[in-house]
Structures are given as C-alpha cells and as structure tokens.
Image: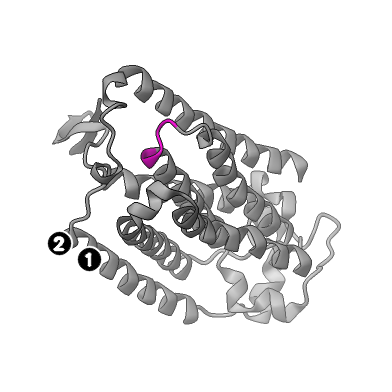
Amino acid sequence: MKKHFASLFFLCILFINSFAQDSLNSLATLPAQQSSFNPKDVYHISWKVDAPVTGAGLALSAFGLHLIQTKKSLTNEQLMEKSRDDIPSFDRGNAGFYSESANNNSYVPFFAGFAMPLVMVVADKTERQQAGKIIVMYTESLAITSTLYTITAGSIDRSRPLVYPDKNGNYRADAGKRASKNSQRSFYAGHTAATASASFFAAKVFSDLNPDSKFKPVIWVIAAALPAVTAYYRYEAGEHFLSDNILGYAIGAGVGILVPQFHKTHKNFQRVSFAPAIGQGYKGFQLAYTFK
C-alpha cells in the first residue's frame, strides 16, 4: 500500500514542480510586465461562451447522474465469478480492502478542497476584487469535472476493490454491499477528481492574481496534498484502485488549471493549428498549441 501511495505522492510533486517552473520562466521572461500588472486585466468572462458551457456541463452532469442511477447490481452468479486475476497486476494492491472509517475520513480533504477557492476569495484582497469572475470560472470548472466523471462512471462498469477477495481469499464487505450498483463504478475516482479540480483551481487563480506572492509554493503544496489525501483514503476504503485515483487526480487538476488559463486575457499560447495528418497506415487531423 505504501509504495502505491508513494507513487501518487510523486505525481503530486511533478505537478508542483511543473507549475513552479512555469512561474519561474514567466518571471524571467516578462520582467517589464510586473510593474504594470493589473489584476482586473488577468481574466475575461464571455457570457456567450461561459453560459452555454456551464449550462451544458450541468445538463450533461444530470444525464450522467441518470446513467449512474440506472446501473445494474451484480447477480449472485456474477458476484461469485469475481476474481483477483481479473484485475491488472498494478491494481491488485488494495483488492478486497473495505473500511467505513477510511471512507468517512476521505470527506475531510474532499470538503476542504471544495472550500479552498471560496476561502481564498474571502481571505485575499486581490481575489475579492475579482470575486464575480472567479465564481463564474469555479462553477464552470466544477460543471466540466462533474460531466466528465458522471458520464464516465455511468457508462463504464468496473467493480470497486471491495467487491473482490483480499490476498487471503477473504471478503471484508458483505455480499449486499459488494453486489450493489454503487459498487460497480470504480472508474474513475470522482472524489479525487473533484478535490483536485477545486484545489488546483484555487492555486492557479491565486498564482495568476498574485504573481509575486511568497505564499505561492505553500498554496500549490496544499492544492496537491488535498486530493492526494483524498485518494489515499479512497484507496484504503476499497472504493477505488490506484489507477482510478491517478486518473481522477490528473483529470481534476487539469480542469482546475485549464479553465482559468483559457479565461486569461493574455494566454500562454499564441495560436492553435489544425491540419491534416497523413502517415503510413493512418489518415486524420492534427491539433496543436504553440506556446510562448
């Protein structure tokens, strides 16, 4: 278990290092802009774009929730056929795990992550001045994260680790819990994704609006740690496999960072190119970003 959690923690460090390096590069290449920095010019909200995107996200989330609610429980025969051998070797570490206390504990960093952007809007003067834009972007990021999770979880059947026997062939969860439709949506970790989306959103916005703040590294560490702790408890609870948590972490962090990024008045990429791509055995199109 410890080596699996270490892998997820290493992923967190990569996120922190990546954005810390990006910040350093920005400071090194754009020194003249620091003196003329105006927080009001950082983000731009377009209701012609943001309202439909957020509305579509909420509608698709409702559809995804419907898919989740209509999933089927396992039959007794299907339950008896569940074997550790059906699980990829890299995901067998927590097969058979089940812990209600770990499940309950996962909600502490989960709710902390959701609160982080709102707390920072209240606590930081610069963010308070841009509260309207931040709330719009935060709502949009949560709607996108929710859409991606609910449709995926509702469309793909993957039993949770608690459904399987542990390495000794024993079951820690009762048969009813293991067979329930709620236990058939392990892919991917929604709690981890939602926490990452909120916490990384908070860190990204704080960094954009406070480019010279000495607290930026601390905020990024907190942002990375909250979903990592959530993932740890979801893993221990037998709710999600390691790969479910890693994917949820990456998707959530990606949405939390990219939504503010695409709302920036001056983005870090100059253009998007779209061109045919033809090679041996394939034909298609290529979409590429050119970064500054």
Between residues 19 and 94, which one lies in front from this camera angle?
A: 19
User: Residue 270 magenta-drawn?
Assistant: no
Image coordinates for residue 80, horizontal then vertical, percent: 71, 72
Q: State the mark number for residue 48.
A: 2
Query: Is residue 11 rendered to the left or right of residue 265?
Result: right
Q: Which residue is mark 1?
A: 51
Image coordinates for residue 211, horizontal then vertical, percent: 40, 33
> Which stretch is magenta?
208-212
Between residues 217 and 106, which one lies in front from this camera angle?
A: 217
User: Residue 209 magenta-drawn?
Assistant: yes
Q: How is the image coloured?
A: one colour
Q: What residue do we see at 47% from left, 75% from top?
A: 68
Image coordinates for residue 200, horizontal then vertical, percent: 47, 47
Secondary-structure class at tag 2? helix
Image coordinates for residue 287, horizontal then vertical, percent: 21, 38
Q: What residue do we see at 47% from left, 55% from top?
A: 117
Amino acid type, label 2: Lys
Within 10 angstroms of label 1, few (less than 14), some, or many (20 or more) residues?
A: some
Quadrant assignment for the C terminus: top left
Is 102 situated above or below 246? below
Q: What residue do we see at 42% from left, 23% from top?
A: 24
Between residues 16 and 2, which one lies in front from this camera angle?
A: 16
Within 10 angstroms of label 2, few (less than 14), some, or many (20 or more) residues?
A: few
Q: Is residue 251 visible?
A: no
Amino acid type, label 1: Ala
Res 266 → quadrant:
top left
Q: What residue do we see at 20% from left, 36% from top?
A: 286
Query: Is residue 247 rendered to the left or right of residue 179?
Result: left
Tag 2 near tag 1, CB within 8 Å: yes
Secondary-structure class at tag 1? helix
Is 87 situated above or below 62? above
